[in-house]
Amino acid sequence: MSSTSTIELRTASPVETSYNHTPASENKDESHASPGNDSTDPATQVPDGGYGWVIVSCCSLFTFHFNGLNGSWGILQNHLLEKHLPSVPTYTIAFVGSLALATEVAFGVLSARLVSWIGFRTAAIAGVLILGLSEVFSGFATSSVGGLFGTSGLMAGIGICVLYSISNSLPAQYFSSHLGTANGVVKVGGGVGATVLALVLEYLIQAVGVSWTFRILGFITLATGLPTAFLIRERSHGRSAAFLDLSLFRDPVYTAIFIAAALGTFTLFAPPYFLPFVATSLGFSSGTGAGLVAGFNACTAVGRLLSSPS
């Protein structure tokens, strides 16, 4: 007896066996083109050199000029009191230099926004023009306390504030792992400027007087600062943010550094402001006072470089 087995044939349901055969190179390209990929963010593509060293040189020159003026103001102040304003109290003329420093701080936030709005190059040109012209105008106001407050105080402070904002922020667009060194080079320019100008200004005052020393200083600032400003090039525009981010003060380290910097600034320029006056009061020559200021500023140049992380 035979048995018959029946085999039922059914149509098999299609099985999805589609594979992605996209070449690896295409996947790589797509990943780089992804909008959310960090590689498209300029912050992750910091060159850490290249044209960044040109930027550092430019910022260092700006610092040379504005910190040089701040650090050598005591020499100008001493000769103003001696030859042009003998009846004016010392602290009054000292307050002219202090007003410039206070203006830098007071308009710091506004300056940072202005630089971001009009661009770094335009802001650099404006800052150099304001600072240079303030020095030229001061040469015509050496016998006027009010004129000095307006030129060497307020006007110079505004110009310095703009240049300070640029010098402090622009190197970060070009450096990451070497940012500390880059900032150190920028800051050491200020120490060198204060050292050199302390000696140069004393020489010029003895040769041509205080008024023409102011004017020559302004001409030098304009002649060297304006071409440098045209070399300024920003890599990216800053992201939109709140006008003042108070959340930063939630970080105790940030708060501590902020307070220390604020308090330290008040006393930072007291020695170079008054060393020339003290030296002449003790019977030393004005050249000796200038040498003391130059020595003090030279030490700050070394300290600025050594304190910068690598």
Image (cartoon, rainbow, N blue to C red):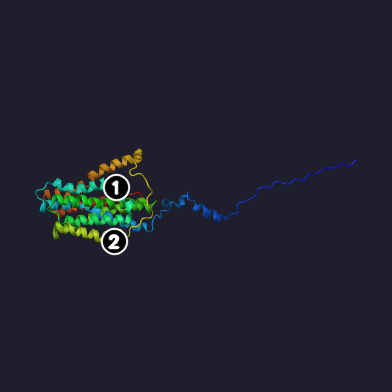
Quadrant position of residue 23: bottom right
Report the residue marked by disc 1: 110
Of residues 103 and 7, the one drawn nearer to the viewer in this rendering = 7
Name the element at disc 1. helix
**Residue appearing at x 35%, y 41% in the figure:** 248
Task: Say which amino acid is labelled 2.
Answer: Pro
**Residue appearing at x 13%, y 47% in the figure:** 90
> Is 134 displayed left or right of 281 in the figure?
right
Of residues 167 and 125, the one drawn nearer to the viewer in this rendering = 125
Of residues 87 and 12, the one drawn nearer to the viewer in this rendering = 12
Quadrant position of residue 287: bottom left
Residue 128 visible? The answer is yes
Gap in Å between the C-alphas at discs 2 and 1?
25 Å
* Residue 134 sits above or below residue 10 on the image: below
Name the residue at the front extreme.
11
Report the residue marked by disc 2: 227
Q: Which numbered marker is on residue 289?
A: none
**Residue appearing at x 28%, y 51% in the figure:** 164
Task: Say which amino acid is labelled 1.
Answer: Leu
Quarter of the picture containing the N terminus is top right
Mark 2, Cα crowd under 10 Å, few <14 / some 14-19 / many 20+, is few
The percent position of residue 283, horizontal first and vertical second, equals 11, 50
User: Between disc 2 and disc 1, whose residue precedes?
Assistant: 1
Residue 295 visible? The answer is no
> Is 34 displayed left or right of 9 in the figure?
left
The percent position of residue 150, horizontal first and vertical second, equals 18, 51
